[in-house]
Structures are given as structure tokens and as C-alpha cells.
Amino acid sequence: MEHLTIGRLADRAGVRVATIRYYERRGLLPEPPRLEGGYRIYSGEAVDRLRMIKGLKEWGFVLRDIA
């Protein structure tokens, strides 16, 4: 299983770090576990989810509908 930092996740999904944090607050992306130092660690599934959200937004869906 792949573990990604928030920066690497943002790069792979093509979104900004702030977008990831916003989606977590809105409940579109589950908050990930954290390492002892407080760093978030994400799985490859988070990349897929973010790409799906991004694609749906490009099709005209709003976040309320995506949720």
C-alpha cells in the first residue's frame, strides 16, 4: 500500500493542497491517519477519489451534488 504526503497527493491528483484540506472539511475526502509528527498520510485511493471529484466538477456538478 502506497503512503503519500499531502503535497505528493496534490501533485498526483492535479489539485492544490488547500483543495484537499477543504474537501476534508466538507466530508468529500475522509481525514487520513497521521504519523507521530502530525503529518497526514494518504493512500492511492485518495488520488482516485480526488480525480473523480475533479472530473465531476469539470462535467458541471457542484460539490453538494458530488457529496
Image (cartoon, rainbow, N blue to C red):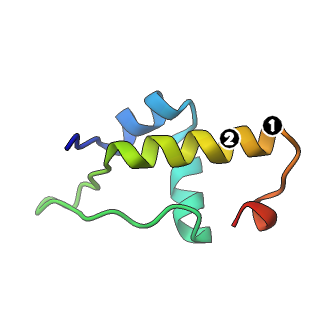
Q: Secondary structure at mark 2?
A: helix
Quarter occupied by residue 37: bottom left
The reply to whether the C-beta atoms of the residues labelled 2 and 1 are less than 8 Å apart is yes
Q: Residue at x 40, y 48 (%)?
A: 45
Looking at the rendered structure, the kind of residue marked 2 is Lys
Taking the spot 33% from the left edge, 62% from the top edge, the residue there is 32
Residue located farthest toward the left when viewing the structure as drawn: 36
Image quadrant for the N terminus? top left
Q: Which mark is residue 23?
A: none
* The one of 7 and 65 positioned closer to us in this rendering: 65
- Tell me: 2 left or right of 6: left
Label 1 Cα crowd, 10 Å radius (few <14 / some 14-19 / many 20+): few
How many numbered circles are shown? 2
Quarter of the image where the C terminus is located: bottom right
Tell me if residue 62 comes above or below residue 31 in the rendering.
above
The residue at which mark 2 appears reads as 54
Taking depth in this image into account, of 67 and 6 the one nearest to the observer is 67
Picture coordinates of residue 58, whole percent (x, y):
80, 37
Residue 61, position in %: x, y? 84, 52
Whether residue 6 sits left or right of residue 48 in the image: it is left
Real-space Cα separation, disc 2 to disc 1, in angstroms = 6 Å
* Callout 1: SS: helix
For this view, does 18 lie left or right of residue 64? left
Please state the horizontal and vertical placement of residue 19, each as a whole percent of the image.
Answer: 59, 49
| Residue kind at label 1, given as amino acid type | Glu
**Crowd rating for badge 2 (residues with CA inside 10 Å; few <14, some 14–19, many 20+):** some
Q: Which residue is mark 1?
A: 58
Which residue is situated farthest in the right direction here? 60
Give the residue displayed 53% in from the left and 49% down from the top.
49
Residue 34 image offset from top left, x and y in percent: 23, 63
